[in-house]
Image (cartoon, rainbow, N blue to C red):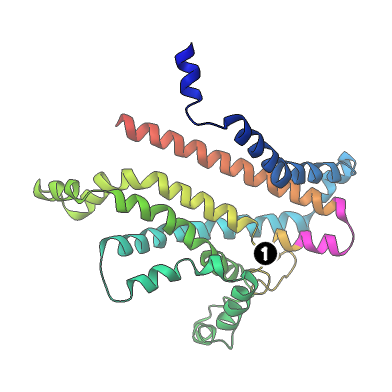
């Protein structure tokens, strides 16, 4: 019994740090979320249901969730490719490219939104080239997806990159010597190790995309029922002093995000157990 107690007390200050952690999380996370629920409680159940199931709100949910989902999928593919190049190859300007990956973290999202809108607008550098082909990016769901790809890419790259750096090349070389071609080596040797970080990167990029506002508000065009995202609708409700309705919409979006993250985390744990038992 004493041995177990001593093991738990190897690091001093456990009670103090635990109390500080709980206090910090309460001030930063739990109390604001509780305020969200309390403010929403000002609505009756029929009012709450009418608010969160109106046609405009459901359309905004659909736009936010679908664009965030597809942007996260794109980031999984190209984030893995970029992380692979940064880890496995040496080339001039590698450090510059590696630093540019974190640009969406440092750049204000509103600035990114303005820049993307200027580039992909019909008279922009890229938009003017796509316009004759009948491809319109700005002020469409495609433009929202492009913006979410921009802000979500670092999450996938920085999640996969450390795992690739820790993988030994000896196993790959052994597989090649045994006659496995490159695709089989990647699928059987590397991919099982990369699945957990890819799922984590997808979850991070997806959750960030659902609540993104600054980089999307300009390029989306903000057309109700078409390109209006849920965060913008929440801001609109706040500007109209409809605070309870705004918190009700935000609460539903929070519950959707939490349920999706819980599902993805459960899938990740199941994948880890299956890979270990394989």
Q: Is residue 168 left or right of residue 35?
A: left
On the image, the x and y values in percent for residue 1 come to: 48, 11
Residue 212 vertical placement versus 18 (above, below)? below
Dot 1: within a 10 Å radius of its alpha carbon, few (fewer than 14), some, or many (20 or more) residues? Answer: some
Q: In what quadrant of the picture does the C terminus appear?
A: top left
Q: Is residue 212 left or right of residue 135?
A: right
Q: Is residue 43 left or right of residue 264?
A: right
On the image, the x and y values in percent for residue 218 come to: 67, 74
Q: Secondary structure at mark 1?
A: loop
Most distant residue in the top direction? 1
Magenta segment: does it hold 100? no
Task: Count up the numbered dots.
Answer: 1
Residue 29 vertical placement versus 70 (above, below)? above
Question: Which residue is denoted by mark 1 in the rendering?
Answer: 213
On the image, the x and y values in percent for residue 211 come to: 65, 57
- Write the residue at 73% across / 44% down: 27
Q: Is residue 80 left or right of residue 25?
A: left
Most distant residue in the front direction? 12
Closer-to-camera residue (11/257): 11
- Write the residue at 52% across / 49% down: 203
- Write the residue at 53% across / 80% down: 134
Residue 130 vertical placement versus 175 (above, below)? below
Magenta segment:
233-244
On the image, the x and y values in percent for residue 233 come to: 76, 61
- Write the residue at 86% across / 54% down: 243
Quadrant location of residue 19? top right
User: Which secondary structure type mostly characterizes the magenta part of the structure?
Assistant: helix
Quadrant location of residue 235? bottom right
Magenta segment: does it hold 241? yes
């Amino acid at each position: 019994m004493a041995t177990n107690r001593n093991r738990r007390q190897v690091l001093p200050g456990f009670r103090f740090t635990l109390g500080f952690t709980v206090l910090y999380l309460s001030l930063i996370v739990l109390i604001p979320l509780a305020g969200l629920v309390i403010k929403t409680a000002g609505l009756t159940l029929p009012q709450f249901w009418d608010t969160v199931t109106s046609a405009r709100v459901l359309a905004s949910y659909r736009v936010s969730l679908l664009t965030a989902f597809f942007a996260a999928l794109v980031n999984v593919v190209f984030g893995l490719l970029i992380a692979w190049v940064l880890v496995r190859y040496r080339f001039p300007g590698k450090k510059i490219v590696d630093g540019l990956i974190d640009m969406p973290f440092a750049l204000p999202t509103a600035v990114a939104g303005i820049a993307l809108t200027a580039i992909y607008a019909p008279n922009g550098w890229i938009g003017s080239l796509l316009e004759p082909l009948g491809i319109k990016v700005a002020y469409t769901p495609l433009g929202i997806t492009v913006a979410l790809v921009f802000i979500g890419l670092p999450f996938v790259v920085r999640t996969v990159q450390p795992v690739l750096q820790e993988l030994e090349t000896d196993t790959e070389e052994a597989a090649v010597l045994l006659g496995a071609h490159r695709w089989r080596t990647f699928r059987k040797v590397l991919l099982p190790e990369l699945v957990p970080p890819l799922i984590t990167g997808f979850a991070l990029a997806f959750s960030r995309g659902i609540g993104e506002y600054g980089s999307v508000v300009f390029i989306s065009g903000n057309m109700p029922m078409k390109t209006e995202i849920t965060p913008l609708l929440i801001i609109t409700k706040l500007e109209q002093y409809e605070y309870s309705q705004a918190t009700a919409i935000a609460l539903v979006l929070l519950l959707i995000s939490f349920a999706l993250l819980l599902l993805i985390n459960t899938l990740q744990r199941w994948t880890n157990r299956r890979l270990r038992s394989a």
